[in-house]
Structure formats: structure tokens, C-alpha cells
Image: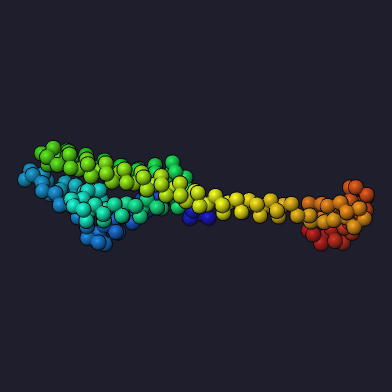
């Protein structure tokens, strides 16, 4: 129960998504190569390249790979929250965070490359962002729809269980949802003193 409460924390969930994303991207050795200007410091190149691997692709295979990975990590908030708004806001927060730093670092450290590649980069970003929103909203609706019959059955069982009589007066047939000592209808003693004490 504590784990579920922890997972419902948005910051924790974003960190978990980032870790899963990292494992999958570097586990499958995916990379998007950027040709930097000579003036760009090597430390900045490493950071920009690192961020690019999470959000940018250069061909169909790369698009499918990155798209599938983002769809997989998008399932986590969907399955935890069962709520459309929370699911896509968490997924977009993770996506926005990585894209924001990628674009800021690239713009600040290599404006020439940023200007040249911006149309391609922003197209990739919008395409991936749109996919995440569609998947988040679509799967949340489907799961909510599938969960509804199960919840209705649970509610129905709960109602039936609550509707069962715990005791029936042998004298007048009055049904009780509790176990009283006396029948309120005919005043017949239903539970003797020893039985009442044994309940506690």
C-alpha cells in the first residue's frame, strides 16, 4: 500500500519513467548523432548528445524504436492512476522536461546547429508528443471502460452482502442487519448474556 502511495507521487513516477527510459535506450544502444560546430565545448556536446538520445530520431527505425519506448513508459501512469488527466499530464511532464533541456542546451551552446536542424527537430518532437497524448488518452479510456464492469460487480456484491440479514427473530420473523440482544418488534430475547460477551 505504501509503495502504491509512493508511485502516485508525480515526481517519483517521472524519475521511474526516466530510469526505465535510460535502461531501454542505452540497453539497445540507440543514439542520435549530432554534428556540432568546432566552437562547441566537448562537455556541452556530451550533455546535448545525451539528451538528444531520449527524444530525437533520424529515420523510420529510430522513430519506431523511440515511439515504442515512450509508449511503454506511458503505460506506467495509465495503470497507476486510471485517470486520463493525471496520466497524460505525467507523461507530458517527463517528455517536456527532457525536450526543454535538450533545446535550451543546444540553443545556448551551438546556435548554428540549432538554426539548421530546428525544423526537423521540432517536427520530431511534435510527432512524438502527439503520439504520447493519443496513447495516454486512448489507453486510459479503454482501461476505464474495461474496469467499469469489474467495479459494478464489486459494488453489486457489496450491496448484496450488506443486504443479507445477520439475524432473524424466531418469534416474529423480523430481520436484523446486526445482532441485537432483543427484538425491537416483539421484545423476544435473541442473544443471551454469555453469547453477547463472547462477541467481544
Q: Residue at x 17, y 39 (%)?
A: 119
Q: Is residue 12 visible?
A: no
Display colour scheme: rainbow
Q: Is residue 6 left or right of residue 41?
A: right
Image quadrant in which the C terminus is located: bottom right
Q: Is residue 191 left or right of residue 43?
A: right
State the image coordinates of residue 46 (x, y, percent, origin top left): 17, 51
Foreground residue among 200 and 129: 129
Report which quarter residue 103 is drawn in: top left
Residue 195 falls in image quadrant: bottom right
Task: Give the farthest residue toward the left.
Answer: 38
At x 44%, y 41%, the residue is 85
Which residue corresponds to the image point at 22% horizontal and 48% vertical from the top-left?
A: 56
Please tell me which residue is depicted at 12% across the width and 40% down the height of the picture: 116
Residue 174 showing in the rendered view = yes
Residue 190: x, y in percent?
A: 89, 56
Q: Position of residue 194 (x, y in %)?
A: 87, 61
Q: Is residue 17 left or right of residue 156?
A: left
Amino acid at each position: 500500500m505504501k509503495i502504491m502511495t509512493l508511485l502516485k507521487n508525480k515526481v517519483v513516477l517521472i524519475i521511474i519513467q526516466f530510469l526505465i527510459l535510460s535502461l531501454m535506450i542505452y540497453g539497445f544502444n540507440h543514439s542520435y548523432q549530432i554534428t556540432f560546430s568546432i566552437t562547441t565545448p566537448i562537455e556541452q556536446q556530451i550533455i546535448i548528445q545525451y539528451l538528444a538520445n531520449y527524444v530525437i530520431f533520424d529515420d523510420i527505425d529510430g522513430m519506431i524504436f523511440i515511439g515504442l519506448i515512450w509508449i511503454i513508459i506511458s503505460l506506467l501512469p495509465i495503470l497507476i492512476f486510471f485517470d486520463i488527466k493525471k496520466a497524460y499530464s505525467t507523461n507530458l511532464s517527463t517528455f517536456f522536461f527532457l525536450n526543454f533541456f535538450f533545446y535550451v542546451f543546444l540553443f545556448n551552446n551551438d546556435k548554428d546547429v540549432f538554426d539548421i536542424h530546428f525544423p526537423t527537430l521540432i517536427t520530431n518532437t511534435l510527432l512524438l508528443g502527439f503520439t504520447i497524448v493519443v496513447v495516454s488518452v486512448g489507453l486510459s479510456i479503454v482501461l476505464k471502460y474495461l474496469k467499469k464492469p469489474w467495479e459494478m460487480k464489486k459494488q453489486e456484491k457489496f450491496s448484496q452482502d450488506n443486504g443479507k440479514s445477520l439475524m432473524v427473530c424466531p418469534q416474529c420473523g423480523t430481520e436484523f442487519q446486526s445482532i441485537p440482544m432483543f427484538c425491537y418488534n416483539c421484545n423476544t430475547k435473541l442473544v443471551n448474556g454469555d453469547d453477547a460477551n463472547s462477541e467481544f
